[in-house]
Each structure stands twice: as structure tokens, then as C-alpha cells.
Image (cartoon, rainbow, N blue to C red):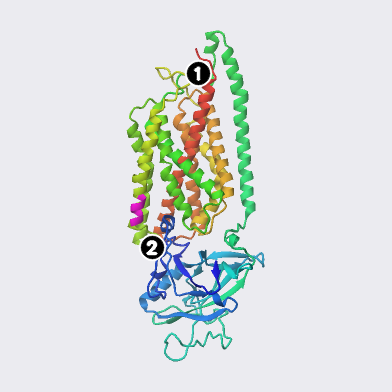
């Protein structure tokens, strides 16, 4: 609630660029600063995103809500060779300044070419621009030094107060003139509200060069708005293309229906017929003539090679699945609002830590099924294997960002917090989960395993493990790739992503697709008397992560104009972590589907 008479500070956030992906704090450029720079408290998610929120010289006075404030001088600076070079570099890399008023981010409204009445909102305004004077070829740099702010407010008729519902800016570059020596109180000749001289264009722009003087000025205009305070974020989160999401969901549902049809056909036709016929056989001779999946009943539950590793990966996948499911539910219910910057990331980190309980439980239950006894070893591997790999990549990337002096580098204190969350909370929880899992009686196999492994016959070319694994990953990836495009756009092109309803539907479709494609391919594999299904079921749906990484590379070359090697390393490093996580998640879904399927079909067969 803002009573008339409040003074509001405009806060400055990081400078961001889609070209370099390296955020910098606002005062890393020689902008004018208040006497003391005060850091706003940031949460864990904000720090990891590189947000650095500080106070500024821009003030919005609410008691003059009806009259605009014009041509307010914020400050005056004189550039030297070093400071001019800093501004030029940021203008070259297309950096934008992000500001915040009353927790709303600053946007630049850009009119849509196709629709006159609607706008696209760009986050933050560019530091400056490059251009040539008429008649010259030489490229010059110009800085945006005049900001025309528009503060939109909604009047509450019941109480005499107004709430801020929008914060927009139009940036201009103008070479200000004044009389005499600059003392901070001079009247500007280029911008004078008394003489009705206002900045409406960038016709005589302010150049950035050595020994140039720059005067930073701003206007504040107030506009009454019909937007209620509760829905003030809606303009930021407007999706331009709902149709694409619906199209993607319908497209994915077609894949699901096709697969569900196949699974139903296998279940009904083949299994029902096979099982009833198999159970009616009187003589052993007739049983000998049987072919297909029933022949491998004595080997199908034989523990696979590297079974420890499989247990670890399944446990980690359960941890991921739990984290994503709970995050999605919270997001769909609206708990993770975008006004809480960094909230989503903080929530995901904390959920990941607490889901360690289920990771330990799942990996040890499977380990016990494989007749394992060293449960503490498997627990340690589950607690450390995946996070350690991610942490190493993260640490290397952080060192690269640190080298660029970017605010995106995670400070030492935050790094310590992350390590504490991992060792202090996650690891003990994995142990508790494992202990509970180990104390439970082992899962019984529905059929006995033979002493001597059966020989696997020669397989057809299309049943080759590599081929069938690669084919299996196409459909789960196909189900999510349009949504993936929007997620990549929001991360790397710095737009808001808040369509969790769509994302939740896509997530459900992903689960169903992973489960069904694995079951179908697993059935074909058992029918050709190949009983090595444990790892294959995990890799079949998990291979969709390979396509995800390839798509990320395609996106990099077609949609982003990143040129710096460090920025490219950042992109591929983070996408590698993302794809690895996707592999663990989809692999686990596929594995459990196949695990349930094999137990189901073999438990319904009578075996002497």
C-alpha cells in the first residue's frame, strides 16, 4: 500500500546481456552512485542468478501523483579514457540496465508491428547504442542518459491511497546544455519544464568518449491504470503464443495415444492369450515347444552387471522425480510467484536436498533385491555420485565467471551454504532413507532364477541394443521439445517463464511416454529371448537426454548470438548439467515401468 506522500527509491539490479550471459552489478559501470551503496538482502536463488539489488539516485515522489516531475538532474560525470572504454564495451555487448520499483521490474514497451494497440515488454533498457552522424562513416557510441519513467498506479476508492501496478521507461540519449559552471543546481537549456522544453527524441545524442561530460536526468510521469494490484504481474507474464503450447500438447497426446494403443494391444492380445494357453498346458513336451518371453523366465530376474551403479542411478532419479513433481505442484497452485525473485531456484534446491530421503530408500530397496549386503557403500555412492559430478562442472563454470569479474559468480559464502546443504542435510537424509529401506524385507522375485545363465540367441538387426536404445529416446523427447524451446528462451533470452499449467501437462505426458515406450521395447526384447533388460530399460527412455543436448546445441547456433568463448562454455556447461538430470529422470521412469511390467507378466504364469 502506498499512501500519497511516500518517497520511493528506484533500486538498480544487475546489468544483463543475452550476448554474453554474464551479469554485472550496476555500479561496475561508472554510473553516479549515492553516498553509500546499500545492498538489498538476496535469497539463495537470487544470488545464484547473479541478481545484485542496490539503491540508486532515482527517486519517485508519490505525493505529486497528479503532476509529472520533469527534467530532474540525477548527477553529472566526466569520462576519462578508462570509464569511456567501460561504457563502450557494455554498449558493444548490448547490455541492459535492470531496475526495480516497489518490487516490479522496469520494462521498455515496444509496439508490435502487427498490432498497433499491443506491446511487447523488453526487460530493462540498453546502456546505449551505436550509430553514425549523418554524412559520416565513423561509428560512434551514444549513452542513454535521460530516462522517461512512467509509473502506473491503481487508485483504491475506499481508502485514499494508490498502489503501483506498472513501471515503464523510455530511454533517450541527449547532449544536455547548461549555463556557467556545473554546481548541481544549474538550469538545463536542453530540458526545462518552465520553458516547456522536454526531451522527446534522441536527435542530439550524448556521445561516449574521453573527456566528455554526461548529465543524467529523468522524468517521472504518473498514469492511472485499471489494472488491480493483485493482477499487476499479468502484463509481464502474457504469453504471446498460447496456440503453440496447445498445438504441442495435442501433438504429444497423439504420441501417447498411439503408444497406449500398442501397450494395450500387447497386454490384451499377446499376454492374455499367451498366459491362458501357457497355464492350460498339460504336458512338459508341449511346454518345451513354447517360444518367446516365457522361455527366459529362469533368467529374467538375474541381477545385471554393474548392479550397484544401476541402484545409485535409480535412487538419484527418484530424488529428481520427487523434486520436480513437488515443485510443479507448488508452481501450479501459485506458491512460486514471479514477484518472489529466485524463489523457484531456492525451492528446487531445498526440495532436492530433502528428497535425499527417497533416494536412499529407493536405491537400497533395489540393492537388496539384487542380494546386496553392503548397504552403506551404496548409500554413500547415492549421496555423492550425481551431486559431485554436477558440483565439479559448476565449480569450473564459476571459476570462469569469476575470471570475467561478473556478478554471476557465486560468492564464497553461498558456495559454503550449498556444500552445507549437501553434506549437512542431504547426506544424512540419504542414510536415514537407506536404513529404513534395508530394514524392510527384500522384494521377492515372482519366478526362481536358474543356476546357469541361458544363452541368448542371435538377435535381429533392429533389436541391437544401441539401435533400440536410440529409437526409444525419440518419442519422450518429441513430447517435450516445444516446451523445451520456451524454457531455453526464458533462461537464455531473459524472459519470464510462468506457464506452469502447460508445463505440468507436458510433464505428465513425458512420464506416460517414457513408461510406455520402455514397456513396448522391453516386451519385444523378451520375446526375442534376450533377458538383459535391466540396464536397457533405463537407457531406452534415458537416451532422450542425448537428443535434448543436441537440440540445445542446435538452439545455440540458430537462436543465440553468443560470441565470447566463456559465454559459450557457460551455455554448454549448464545444458550438460540439465541434460544429465533429464537422463536420470527419464531413465528412472522407464526403469520402474519395465520393472513393474516384467513382474506383472511373470507372476501371472504358472511355472513348475
Give the number of the mark in front: 2 or 1.
2
Toward which corner of the image does residue 161 lie, by quadrant? bottom right
Up-down: is 404 above or below 144? above
In the foreground, 306 or 447: 447
Residue beneath label 2, please? 406
Span of residues in magenta: 413-418
In the foreground, 97 or 91: 97
- Residue drawn at x 62%, y 51% is 244
Left or right: where does residue 605 sit relative to residue 253?
left
Q: Position of residue 170 (x, y in %)?
A: 55, 73
Q: Position of residue 217 (x, y in %)?
A: 49, 79
Up-down: is 276 above or below 32? above
Q: Residue furthest front?
A: 159
Quadrant where the image shows the N terminus: bottom right
- Residue drawn at x 59%, y 63% is 229
Q: Position of residue 33 (x, y in %)?
A: 40, 74
Up-down: is 209 above or below 601? below
- Residue drawn at x 54%, y 46% is 329
In the foreground, 368 or 524: 368
Classify mark 1: residues with Cα within 10 Å, few (<14), some (14-19) or many (20+).
many
What secondary structure is found at the residue carrying circle 1?
A: helix
**Label 2 or label 1, whichever comes before in sequence order:** 1
Left or right: where does residue 510 sit relative to residue 23?
right
Give residue 295's mark. Answer: 1
Chief secondary structure of the magenta portion: helix
CB within 8 Å, label 2 to label 1? no
Amino acid at each position: 500500500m502506498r499512501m500519497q506522500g511516500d518517497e520511493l527509491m528506484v533500486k538498480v539490479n544487475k546489468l544483463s546481456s543475452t550476448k554474453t550471459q554474464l551479469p554485472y552489478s550496476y555500479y561496475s559501470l561508472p554510473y553516479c552512485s549515492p553516498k553509500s551503496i546499500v545492498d538489498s538482502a538476496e535469497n539463495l536463488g537470487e544470488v545464484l542468478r547473479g541478481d545484485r539489488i542496490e539503491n540508486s539516485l532515482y527517486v519517485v515522489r508519490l505525493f505529486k501523483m497528479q503532476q509529472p516531475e520533469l527534467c530532474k538532474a540525477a548527477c553529472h560525470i566526466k569520462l576519462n579514457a578508462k570509464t569511456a572504454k567501460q561504457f563502450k564495451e557494455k554498449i558493444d555487448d548490448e547490455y541492459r540496465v535492470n531496475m526495480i520499483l516497489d518490487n516490479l521490474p522496469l520494462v521498455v514497451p515496444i509496439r508490435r508491428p502487427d498490432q498497433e494497440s499491443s506491446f511487447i515488454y523488453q526487460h530493462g533498457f540498453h546502456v546505449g547504442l551505436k550509430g553514425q552522424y549523418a554524412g559520416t562513416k565513423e561509428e560512434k557510441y551514444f549513452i542513454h542518459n535521460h530516462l522517461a519513467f512512467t509509473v502506473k498506479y491503481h487508485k483504491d476508492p475506499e481508502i485514499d491511497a494508490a498502489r503501483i501496478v506498472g513501471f515503464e521507461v523510455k530511454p533517450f540519449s541527449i547532449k544536455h546544455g547548461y549555463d556557467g559552471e556545473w554546481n548541481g543546481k544549474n538550469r538545463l537549456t536542453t530540458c526545462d519544464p518552465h520553458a516547456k522544453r522536454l526531451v522527446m527524441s534522441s536527435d542530439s545524442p550524448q556521445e561516449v568518449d574521453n573527456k566528455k561530460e554526461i548529465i543524467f536526468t529523468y522524468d517521472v510521469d504518473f498514469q492511472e491504470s485499471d489494472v488491480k494490484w493483485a493482477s499487476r504481474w499479468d502484463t509481464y507474464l502474457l504469453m504471446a503464443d498460447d496456440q503453440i503450447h496447445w498445438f504441442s500438447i495435442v501433438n504429444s497426446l497423439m504420441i501417447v495415444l498411439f503408444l497406449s494403443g500398442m501397450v494395450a494391444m500387447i497386454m490384451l492380445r499377446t499376454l492374455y492369450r499367451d498366459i491362458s494357453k501357457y497355464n492350460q498346458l498339460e504336458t512338459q513336451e508341449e511346454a518345451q515347444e513354447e517360444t518367446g518371453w516365457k522361455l527366459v523366465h529362469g533368467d529374467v530376474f538375474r541381477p545385471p552387471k554393474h548392479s550397484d551403479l544401476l541402484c545409485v542411478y535409480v535412487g538419484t532419479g527418484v530424488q529428481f522425480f520427487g523434486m520436480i513433481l513437488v515443485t510443479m505442484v507448488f508452481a501450479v497452485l501459485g506458491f512460486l510467484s514471479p514477484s518472489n525473485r529466485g524463489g523457484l531456484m531456492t525451492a528446487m534446491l531445498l526440495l532436492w536436498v530433502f528428497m535425499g530421503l527417497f533416494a536412499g530408500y529407493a536405491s537400497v530397496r533395489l540393492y537388496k533385491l539384487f542380494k546386496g549386503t553392503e548397504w552403506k557403500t551404496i548409500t554413500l555412492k547415492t549421496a555423492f555420485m550425481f551431486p559431485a559430478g554436477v558440483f565439479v562442472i559448476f565449480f569450473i563454470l564459476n571459476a570462469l565467471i569469476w575470471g570475467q569479474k561478473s556478478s554471476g559468480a557465486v560468492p564464497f559464502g553461498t558456495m559454503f551454504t550449498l556444500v552445507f546443504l549437501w553434506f549437512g542435510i542431504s547426506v544424512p537424509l540419504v542414510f536415514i532413507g537407506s536404513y529404513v529401506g534395508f530394514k524392510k524385507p527384500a522384494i521377492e522375485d515372482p519366478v526362481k532364477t536358474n543356476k546357469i545363465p541361458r544363452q541368448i540367441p542371435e538377435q535381429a538387426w533392429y533389436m541391437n541394443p544401441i539401435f533400440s536404445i536410440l529409437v526409444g529416446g525419440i518419442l519422450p523427447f518429441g513430447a517435450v521439445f516445444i516446451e523445451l524451446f520456451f524454457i531455453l528462451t526464458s533462461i537464455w533470452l531473459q524472459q519470464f517463464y510462468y506457464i506452469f499449467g502447460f508445463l505440468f501437462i507436458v510433464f505428465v505426458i513425458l512420464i506416460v511416454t517414457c513408461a510406455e515406450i520402455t514397456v513396448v521395447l522391453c516386451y519385444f526384447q523378451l520375446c526375442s529371448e534376450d533377458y538383459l533388460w535391466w540396464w536397457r530399460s533405463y537407457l531406452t527412455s534415458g537416451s532422450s537426454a542425448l537428443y535434448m543436448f543436441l537440440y540445445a546445441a542446435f538452439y545455440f547456433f540458430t537462436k543465440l548470438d553468443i560470441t565470447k568463448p566463456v559465454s559459450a562454455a557457460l551455455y554448454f556447461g549448464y545444458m550438460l548439467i540439465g541434460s544429465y538430470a533429464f537422463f536420470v529422470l527419464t531413465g528412472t521412469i522407464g526403469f520402474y515401468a519395465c520393472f513393474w511390467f516384467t513382474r506383472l507378466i511373470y507372476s501371472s504364469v504358472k511355472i513348475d
